[in-house]
Amino acid sequence: MSINYQKELNSEQLDVVIHGDGPCLVLAGAGSGKTRTIIYRVAYLLEQGIKPENILLVTFTNRAAKEMVERLDSLVGTGVQLPWAGTFHSIANKILRRHARELGLPGEAGAKTGYQSNFTILDEDDAESFIKIASKEHAPESAGKNRGGGNKFPSSKVVKAIISFARNAQIKVGEAIERKFGAQEMWADEITLIARDYDKKKREANAMDFDDLLTNFLFLVSGAVGKTFSQQFQYILVDEYQDTNKIQAAIIKELSRAHNNVLAVGDDAQSIYSFRAADIENILNFEKTYPKAKIFKLTTNYRSSQEILSLANAVIANNPKQYKKNLNTILKTGVKPELHPKGDQGEEAEFIASKVESLLRGGLECPDVAVLFRAAHHSQRLEMELLKCGIDYDYRGGLRFFERSHVKDALAYLRILNNLEDTIAWMRVLMFEEGIGPGTAGKIIDMVKQFVILSVAKDPSNSKQEGILRFAQNDIAGKLSDKARGGWQNFMNIFSALSEIGKSRPAELVRAIIDSPYRNYVEAQWTDASSRLDDIRQLAIFAGKFSSLEEFLGEAALQEAFHLKNQKDKAAKAKAGKIVLSTIHQAKGLEWKAVFIIGLTDGGFPHERAMSEEGGLEEERRLFYVAVTRAKKYLYLTYPMSKGGGSSYGGLASRSYNNSNWGESFASAPSMFLGEVDEALLNDKSLLINPSTALNQELTYEPDDPAYVLQSEATAGKPIKLKPGSFLRSVEDL
């Protein structure tokens, strides 16, 4: 079957397909048809007589590889198979199975200790089990033992993440800790030794983890094996090249040495995975790695309106290190992206829910709508509002807010404070403690209940008072082993701090949990500890709405109950689908007709932690660019102008709280990204001004233009250019 490439492709795509010999970098903008271009390039090579086994097609997911092969088969219609199409890891596994004995890694006594072809590939659980074994010699006496400041030795999951990042970034363990795992800095020496022994034990067991597949693959292709496969692979095509790490880029370089035909397809503007050790320098330095490289640009977007693309182009233009390109399209809707600042998170959530309902009434289907956010904790208030309005949603990138384990942990401590007989809450929190297992936890719970019974007998009104537990503290400790006694004391330290605050200040109680030894547990246990602590801070903001612990706990419990009820009520409408709530990282590669990007505040997006990392601001801007380019027709940008302040959002349960106060309220500045955008590109609903222009100026009002305008003597009679989303942060700005 002959393909009419001129008819099937636009001029940019056709140029790549026909002239893609030699080292080529294809800068494929969002929605520009990169997959189509790759498939047609492979079809063209086959038409030119290149055999399938001489083509290496590398993707980042098995699904992407399968889709490409299926679309290729549909295009050429000959049942073609590409034996070397797959992910880096799958290609590595195939080659390592053939040549594992040739790895020739040095043993302890100078002997060669290679792998056998039947090596085992360790999954995450298996790898963590090996780390636990390796930790026994080098960790403190027990994996949970504290070091100065109460910091616990990290879990095997965290240690594995540190070792993995170091290997993929090709840096030392200590540097990996310094760059991405600062809370574990005191354990750098121990983790370095564990990494060494972990590697040794894997080789002794003829086992590789996923990182070994890549490092051993690179080791192989850097030698004689690499020369063989370099001769075989006449043409190499790599998808999502901006997501490669140092090892993967080096593998491609080695395999391309014989023929030098590398087609690397990617978009530096969508490089957002540095936390996985992806290195944007691979794509930015492509011309240095391959000196005679050709550069192609795919800039015709088939997804978004020009109004949305103009905003995206303006956003990414502020990154200093990039390949410059401007996306364009033939699609024009006349609908500008809209900016909607709201009073606080509650009002922001109400606006989004109301607008979603309006879009659905206007003809959009639920799956056409997505709400995107920088961090998972940004969705908490919106989730509640959607439940209230009966709008079902599919949460991408994690669990619903009140289903998250750390949120349940924090609530469990407060449940005990509220009800000493809450067995489930007791069991949950005691299991965090060193030396306390299920048996000991059950024993403690039984003793607590006995003290409650005795207290009731003496004074029925005192049955739930926290003083009971403090009175019983020493008696319970005396019946525990030395190891369990330490865990019990740690729990009591937390409980005592909560007791001193009392039950009338739920927000302070939640914040006290963040400042307690529970924080050390989170940092030692999880690789995403900072995000989990952010969730609990968001819980504290929510708790600030209540003046009673009992009411707060009741409302929190009802969130899941209302979710379950909502699921049943909507069963009949299941075919209509759900709107999507997603972190931006999870949304990459997807598209929707209507997109909301929420929480665009200073410190929220860009995230404050990213600002302290090298290249962090630029990656945050790329992340915003990715979010913007998910939208096809409608784009709404929102942010709360205050955090933790009053909200008109009504809860789902009857409760007593101060409607005008959700806890401590403070002004929230808009994201710097909004200030980088020309206001002509936005339908700006803020009607507010840049605080820096407010000083020493007179406020006037123009009836024909419903916006506030400032004029000074120097600017009288001249229009003042206002930045989108600017506003007065405090009285001092006046």
Image (spheres, helix red, strand yellow):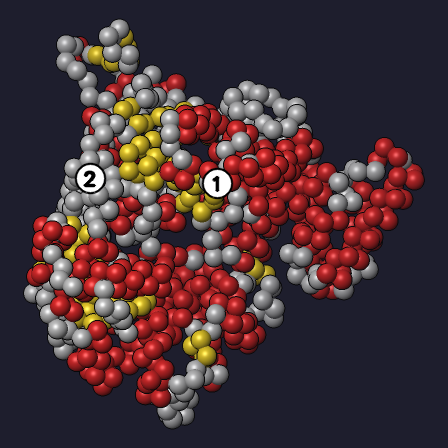
The mark tally for this picture is 2
**Which label belongs to residue 94?**
none
Which of the 4 image quadrants contains residue 679? top left
Q: Nearer the viewer, residue 544 or 325?
A: 325
| Residue at figure coordinates x 28%, y 38% from the top left | 632
Image quarter where the N terminus lies is: bottom left
Secondary structure under badge 2? Answer: helix
Secondary structure under badge 1? Answer: helix
Q: Nearer the viewer, residue 445 or 566?
A: 566
Q: Which residue is mark 1?
A: 575
Tag in front: 2 or 1? 1
Q: Is residue 177 above or below residue 333?
A: below
| Residue at figure coordinates x 38%, y 32% from the top left | 364
* Within-10-Å neighbours for mark 2: few <14, some 14–19, many 20+: some
Q: Is residue 113 above or below residue 484?
A: below
| Residue at figure coordinates x 33%, y 56% from the top left | 274
Image quarter where the C terminus lies is: top left
Q: Is residue 95 above or below residue 486?
A: below
Disc 2 residue type (three-letter): Asn
Tell me residue 322's x, y (percent).
Answer: 18, 50
Which of the 4 image quadrants contains residue 503? top right
Disc 1 residue type (three-letter): Lys
* Within-10-Å neighbours for mark 1: few <14, some 14–19, many 20+: few
Q: Which residue is mark 2?
A: 313
Which of the 4 image quadrants contains residue 3? bottom left
Query: Is residue 689 shown to the viewer in this render?
Result: yes
Looking at marks 2 and 1 on the same chain, the residue that comes earlier in the sequence is marked by 2
Query: Is residue 559 shown to the viewer in this render?
Result: no
Per the model, the C-alpha gap separating discs 2 and 1 is 37 Å
Tell me residue 234's x, y (percent).
Answer: 16, 74
